[in-house]
Image (spheres, rainbow, N blue to C red):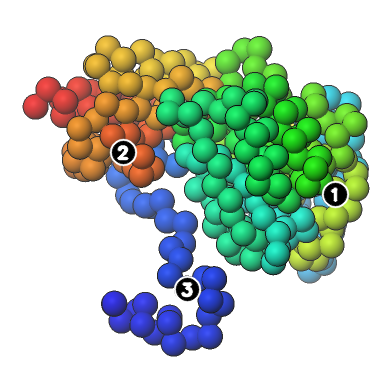
Amino acid sequence: MNEQLERLNRLPLRDDLRGQTPYGAPQLEVPVLLNVNENTHGLPQEVADAIAESVRQAVAGLNRYPDREFTELRERLASYLGHGLSVENIWAGNGSNEVLQHILQAFGGPGRTAMSFPPTYSMYPLLANGTGTEYIAGHRAADFTLSASSAADQVREAKPNIVLLCTPNNPTGTALGLDVVEAVYEAGSASNAVVIVDEAYAEFSHAGTPSALSLLPGRERLIVSRTMSKAFALAGARLGYMAAAPEVTDALRLVRLPYHLSAVTQATANAALAHAPALLANVEDIKAQRDRIVSELTELGLQPAESDANFVLFGGLENPRKTWQGLLDAGVLIRDVGIPGHLRVTAGTEAETTAFLTRLRELLSA
Ligand SMILES: *Cc1c(COP(=O)(O)O)cnc(C)c1O
């Protein structure tokens, strides 16, 4: 055991945290970063200027606590989402990870369970653990799909307090049909389960893919979470949000820290939302690169999964670790998500995507 771990183990750490590993996607300085599904296009100058001006104005009031209810921000988020939502349906946090943590704090905790369907977002078990919620791993078909009947059967069997559905799913990229969400919600009624639909990548879905936002009316246990970290190119600002029945936001107020969204964060997100169309202008380009990755990887004899997100999971690799290292040696960082034979790559700019595909082609023919 290394010395750092030994010192950690001498502390009175909670037993359920002993031996756990923190979230740790590598943060390396290489020219082409395609490993954490950021929007690599960056912010248009006009939006960067508007955010800087909004923050400049907020600085004058930094001696005071910010608006605890972040009302302007919730209004803007409601109007961005549409679907007849209004301010009392919206909640936000420092990244959607914090929103998910609030939900687990309010509806999970010791003696309760949260279920999701791996391979899925690696933060779900970590968030469960951090809040003392027991994590239940469901399963998918071999091709990573999840049918309505399978998901509902598993929920009926496990009777979880919380279900997390990720669509489009990270790391596979596949979107779930609304029939899956409806079936899981129905199946969850026996255990009064809160059903979270994590739509972090919704803006990248193929045209016509419906959002679970349309299912909210009449379903008070349903929560749809979104983020400004991906399509909005604002991963560094830390702003995630959710839409649900007003009583859900009331529940989350019980566990949030007072003034959790700083005045600087609120000013940043408000200005960004005022310029949403400009910020989202690169989404079509990213979708085109995503589709290009799927078709070129297929030509290379690999097996990319269909994707509705800004990344592609691909299989058919004999030695993913070696391929990952070969790409990194050429300055291209992608993600090993721990699925045998597979790697995941973010769709970047056209030039970044070309750098990735060119290097990969060289590695495979070597
Ligand atoms: C990236 C991602 C998020 C977003 O996390 P933030 O905390 O908002 O940056 C949420 N869910 C999934 C599945 C993701 O991949």
Which residue sits furthest left? 366
Percent of width and height locating residue 264? 70, 55
322 and 20: which one is in front?
A: 20
Percent of width and height locating residue 129? 58, 62
Residue 18: which numbered mark, if any?
Answer: 3
Residue 2: which numbered mark, if any?
Answer: none
Label 3 CB less than 8 angstroms from ligand 1: no
Disc 2 is placed on an element classified as: loop
The answer to which image quadrant residue 150 occupies is top right
The structure residue drawn at horizontal position 43% and vertical position 81%, both measured from the top left corner, is 8
> Which residue is the site of mark 2?
340
The structure residue drawn at horizontal position 30% and vertical position 44%, both measured from the top left corner, is 30
134 and 95: which one is in front?
A: 134
Report, in whole angstroms, how far the alpha carbon at label 2 lies from the one at label 1. 40 Å
Mark 2 Cα shell of 10 Å, populated few (<14), some (14-19), many (≥20): some
Residue 130, placed above or below residue 215:
below
The answer to which image quadrant residue 193 occupies is top right
The answer to which image quadrant residue 278 occupies is top right
Mark 3 Cα shell of 10 Å, populated few (<14), some (14-19), many (≥20): few
Percent of width and height locating residue 58? 76, 54
Give the amino acid at mark 3.
Arg
* Badge 3 or badge 1: first in the primary sequence: 3
Give the amino acid at mark 1.
Thr
Residue 249: which numbered mark, if any?
Answer: 1
